[in-house]
Image (cartoon, grey):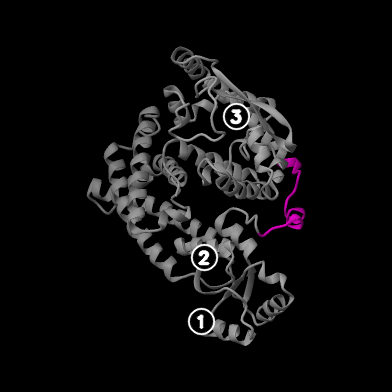
Amino acid sequence: MKLKLNGTQMNKAKKILLLGSDAALLYASLAGALAVRYQTLNIGSYFSANFLPFSAIFSLWILVFYISDFYRRPEFASQSEIIKSLARGVFVSGLLSIVILYLFPSFFRLTPKTNLLLVGVMFLILSYLSRIEWLRLFKIGGVRLFVLGGSQTTREISARVGTIPYAGYRIIGTEREFPGDTSLLFEIIKKNKIEVLLVDSALLKDKNNAAAAYEILRSGIRVLNSTEFYENICEKEPLEDINAEWFVDNVLTRRPFYDAAKRSLDILLSCILTVAFFIPFIIISCLIKTTSRGPVLFSQKRTGQNGNEFTLHKFRTMKSNENGPLWTTARDSRITPVGKALRKTHLDEIPQLWNILKGDVSFTGPRPERVELAKQYEKFPFYHSRHIVKPGLTGWAQINFRSSASLEEAFEKLKYDVYYVKNRSLVLDLMILIRTVRHIFGIQYK
């Protein structure tokens, strides 16, 4: 029996292949480093002695690679991106490894710095060559896809697939409408060896088009609608194409186990961070108080779960009693010098640990909006669906899209928020937290 994977499964499989390849190459680099270091091919005893400490180091390296998005699609868009990403990842991993070597000298006593340097150099070379080969294979492979439709959703899908050839699909052709004669479409499919037909959901609302799609499905060709495919490939929801029925079928308002586990983790992590940030809290408070007039904390009404209002607390980053637009920009004259530093490092968010302890917000979820902005956003289709879950300190929209400065950008972020509401899980929350850390340390998203 021939096993067929859909695009999402194929994409996950390729990520696993890349990660497994890196793990294998790390140990191969260790073997090579030992052979060079001790000038012998008989490295069995050396390898055994170094295996455990280097396994700990390699676990750290893999974690750094994951945080650096080595296994997320855009990182492999070109050979130049590969070498830049690898060099940055190996450098950061090497520095962290040296720190660990000094912190735990007894455990790493058999791991001299020379071996670590050799491993890093060899892995950089081997991984670069490996990724070039993976890139070639991913571009050659892929399910042959034909796109039928000309909506904004299908245009975004085509653009997205075009920039990530290793996502599991390769677009062979496109048409805006179903041909009047279905046999013409069958001819195109047969001539181009199409494996999957992607159909705009709007086209399927027509009974004749739906019947034609069914006939194509009967012939053995897989038929996908654009709504589900858009979610998988773009990691957001096409709000223009979905309706209330979609929410009833796909969105759960309560997930008891998940909700309880997430709340427990929120309390535990916020308590730990409150202790860890106690001294920075005092220092930042003094800086704000001595450099600008006004209170240390900035309190503001926000819209939370189920549309309930609550008071959000942050360090004040703007001048007091100054009016202006609801949205702020990086060069906003209202932002104080200390405020710029706090915003850049996200340290202005520290007081929100109290909001998390109270249960107003969680660590992850749709970002709570100002009450005034929330009222403006109510014109967006299904805007209130983001209030099904508790808002968050960081969220899926924040790590995938820039801060909104217009209604258009706010609507784009809503697509990511709805995706989170539908797909929320502890695994997704962990991914958001990891990528938030990545963002804080200045590695920009693409």
Q: Give the percent coordinates (x, y) of residue 386.
A: 68, 43
Q: Nearer the viewer, mark 1 or mark 3?
A: 1
Disc 2 crowd rating (10 Å Cα; few below 14, some 14-19, many 20+) is some
Identify the disc placed on residue 85: none
Q: Which residues are magenta?
A: 241-258
Report which residue position mark 3 lands on.
Answer: 269
The answer to which of 97 and 15 lies nearer the viewer is 15
Q: Amino acid at mark 2?
A: Ser
The answer to whether 107 is drawn above or below residue 85 in the figure is above
Mark toward the start of the polypeptide (2 vs 3): 2
Q: Is residue 386 left or right of 444 when viewed as pictured?
A: right
Q: Is residue 303 left or right of 8 when viewed as pictured?
A: right
User: Do the CB atoms of the residues marked 1 and 2 lie less than 8 Å apart?
Assistant: no
Residue sitting at x 55%, y 46%: 409
Q: Give the percent coordinates (x, y) of residue 185.
A: 59, 82
Report which residue position mark 1 lands on.
Answer: 192
User: Do the CB atoms of the residues marked 2 and 3 lie less than 8 Å apart?
Assistant: no
Residue sitting at x 60%, y 48%: 411
| Label 3: which secondary element | helix
Q: Give the percent coordinates (x, y) of residue 342.
A: 46, 26
State yes or no: residue 247 in magenta.
yes
